[in-house]
Amino acid sequence: MTAKLRVQNVYKVFGDAPQEALTRLEKGESKEQIFSETGLTVGVQDASFDVEEGEIFVVMGLSGSGKSTLVRMLNGLIPPTSGHILIDDDDVANCTPEQLREIRRQKITMVFQHFALFPHKTVADNAGYGLRIKGVNPKERRERAVKALGQVGLAAHADSFPSELSGGMQQRVGLARGLATDPQILLMDEPFGALDPLIRREMQDELIVLQRQLKKTIIFITHDLNEALILGDKIAIMKDGQFVQVGTAQEIVSNPADDYVAAFVADIDRGRVFTADDVSNEPAPVKLGQDTAQDAMRSMEELNRNALYVVDGDQVAGVVTYRDLAGAGDQPQDLADAMVTEYPTADGDAQLHELYAAASSGLPIAVTDENNKLVGVVEPEAVFAQLSGEESAAPEPPNAPDETGATKPGAA
């Protein structure tokens, strides 16, 4: 895919002689040393990243890390000292004031942490304020504002005033104001930071649902790693103006780049980071009416599994376990006779905390698509290992005897 936003080697130095700071950075001096000797502050240092169309790119960092400076450079509120910020073919870092105004009018908008709503204007007027600035006529402005309010669940409050809304509802109005102009890129600077934890989580969930419908390109700024991991298709962790690590939530939690990142992710709820797809195996099913019990047992031994799913054509029919098949001894057995037809299932994007109860059943979890086609299998041990952070835990050796004396591929 072609990047919608491309940031290339962007620096921001605050002070009267920024080039001196750039020269010192090239020599390997730290931002602390540069400040102590020159008074120049390095806000952002050599930031480079691409954001694909329809992607949520989260920039996470503590106060003073440079994340807010970075996002303000993306729409030209702060000019970079050097580097390029490309939206399609337009370079925000090197364009005329007229070009920058057009980029803001057509391509990019910002949603702030503090709602900045006009208390004397209705919700609809607040949502349509960006359209008013763009010169849209009142009738169309009202229609588009109400449509945007509908997208965030507030159409019924179009004629209310901000004081009549809760904090979470006011933030939805701020989001609707951004959506009403139909921007290609949404910059969201700590948009949920002023909300209490419960409302904040609700807003995160609502943004995920809304993004599935609208597929906007979003750059989301936060100081909360949990929020970053929940929302981000890709995440950049900033420290002292630099990117420490860029990757998916799963990559960052599984393979932190350094001790700084490792300390952040140590107490993360892994059950909300990893999904069924992240821990699933190839389905390797046996076929009803074609494979025998002996075929199924042989496959389990080769794959070191305790159970295999049975498919009838493209559809999942049930699951057979090694223990049940071994209990029949040498007698020929039809798979249908030993098949369990009540089995746990999950979508590939189901988070692991949603699979805990299913994994406790002891049966592998069938990962199915919308047509009940088997696309993967999650072993219970994989769920528990990932939740505990012990992904590399070794399975029980194959052909270990169970308590009845029957051999089986792995732990029950």
Image (cartoon, helix red, strand yellow):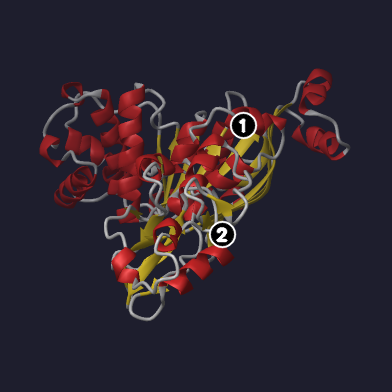
Determine the image quadrant of residue 367.
bottom left
**Amino acid type shown at disc 2:** Asn
Residue 172 visible in image = yes
Residue 75 visible in image = no
In this picture, residue 348 sits left or right of residue 222: left
Q: In the image, residue 402 lies at what x, y percent? A: 51, 48
Determine whether 8 is above or below 33 in the image: below
Query: Depth-wise, is mark 2 or mark 1 nearer the camera?
Result: 2
Kindly identify which numbered label has been placed on residue 75: none
Mark 1: secondary structure: loop
Q: Looking at the image, which residue is at 79% across and 33% down?
A: 21
Kindly identify which numbered label has been placed on residue 66: 1
**Front-lying residue, 69 or 15:** 69
Callout 2 crowding tier (Cα within 10 Å): few <14, some 14–19, many ≥20: some
Total numbered circles: 2
Considering every residue shown, the one lying at the far top of the view is 36
Q: In the image, residue 258 lies at what x, y percent? A: 72, 35
Q: Looking at the image, which residue is at 53% across and 56% down?
A: 407
Whichever of labels 2 and 1 marks the residue nearer the N terminus, that label is: 1
In this picture, residue 360 sits left or right of residue 412: left
Kindly report the distance in space between the C-alpha atoms of the residues bearing marks 2 and 1: 49 Å
Considering every residue shown, the one lying at the far right of the view is 27
Residue that carries the numbered disc 2 in the rendered image: 304
Mark 2: secondary structure: loop
Q: In the image, residue 92 lies at what x, y percent? A: 56, 50
Considering every residue shown, the one lying at the far bottom of the view is 290
**Amino acid type shown at disc 1:** Gly
**Front-lying residue, 6 or 104:** 6
Q: Looking at the image, which residue is at 55% across and 48% down?
A: 248
